[in-house]
Amino acid sequence: MMEITINYSDEQFYSEELETLILRVLSKGAELQNVAEDAELSLLICDADTIHELNKTYRGVDAPTDVLSFALNEGEEEDGMEEEKVLGDIIINLYRAVEQAEEFGHSKEREMAYLSVHGFLHILGYDHYDPEEKRKMREKEEEILGACGMERIVTEGKLENDGE
C-alpha cells in the first residue's frame, strides 16, 4: 500500500477520524489509479497564512487557496529510483475546507476528503484548465470518492465543488 504521511502546521488541527478518512480516500485513489505500492506521498494540513505564503512563493499568487499540490517529478526525468517512489506533497488549508463545507452544505470531513483526492489527482498529472481535462479530473474524483461511499451531491442543479 502507498505510504502516506500526514503532518500538521499546528497540532490543534490533528483529528484521528479525519486522518483515518484521508488515509482511506488516498489509499483507494492509489488503488484505482494503479499507483505503485512502494510510492510515497505527504500531506500537510495547515492554516490560511501558511498556504498563502506557499502559494505566493511557489505559484506567484498572493492569496490563500484551499489546496496545493507539488508533484516531485513534475516535468523531470530522473534516473534515480528513490525519487520515483516519492510522488509529492499535498497542502490543505483546513480553514478554507471548513468554509467550503459550509458553502456546499456538507461536513468538514467530506470537504477534506474531496480536497485530498483533488490534490492527489493533480500530483498524478490531472488538471482542470480546459473543459475536457476538467471533465476527466471530475470523473476520477467522483470514482474515488464514490468507491469510499462519498458521492457528490447535486444541489439546485449544480454539483458541489464544481467551481475552479
Image: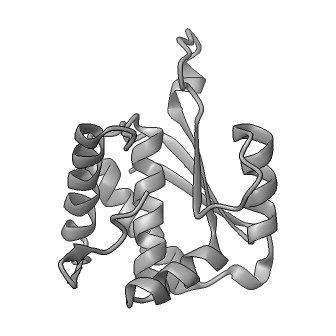
- At 80% from the left and 42% from the top, the residue drawn is 57
As drawn, 141 above or below 72:
below
* Residue 98 % position (x, y): 56, 83
Q: Residue at x 23, y 44 (%)?
A: 136
**Quadrant in the picture for residue 150:** bottom left
Q: Residue at x 80, y 62 (%)?
A: 50
Q: In the rendered view, how is the structure colored?
A: one colour
Q: Is residue 63 left or right of residue 144?
A: right
Q: Nearest the camera: 55 or 143?
A: 55
Q: Is residue 151 visible?
A: no
Image side of residue 160 versus residue 55, left or right? left
Q: Is residue 37 left or right of residue 83?
A: left
Q: Which residue is pictured at 30% across the width and 46% down the height?
A: 134
On screen, residue 152 above or below 52: below
Q: Position of residue 31 (x, y in %)?
A: 27, 50
Mark yes or no: residue 120 visible.
Answer: yes
* Quarter the C terminus occupies: bottom left
Q: Position of residue 124 (x, y in %)?
A: 40, 37
Q: Position of residue 85 (x, y in %)?
A: 51, 32
Residue farthest along the front direction in this orientation? 156
- Numbered-mark total: 0
Can you say whether 72 is above or below 131 in the image?
A: above
Residue 45 or 100: which is nearer the viewer?
100
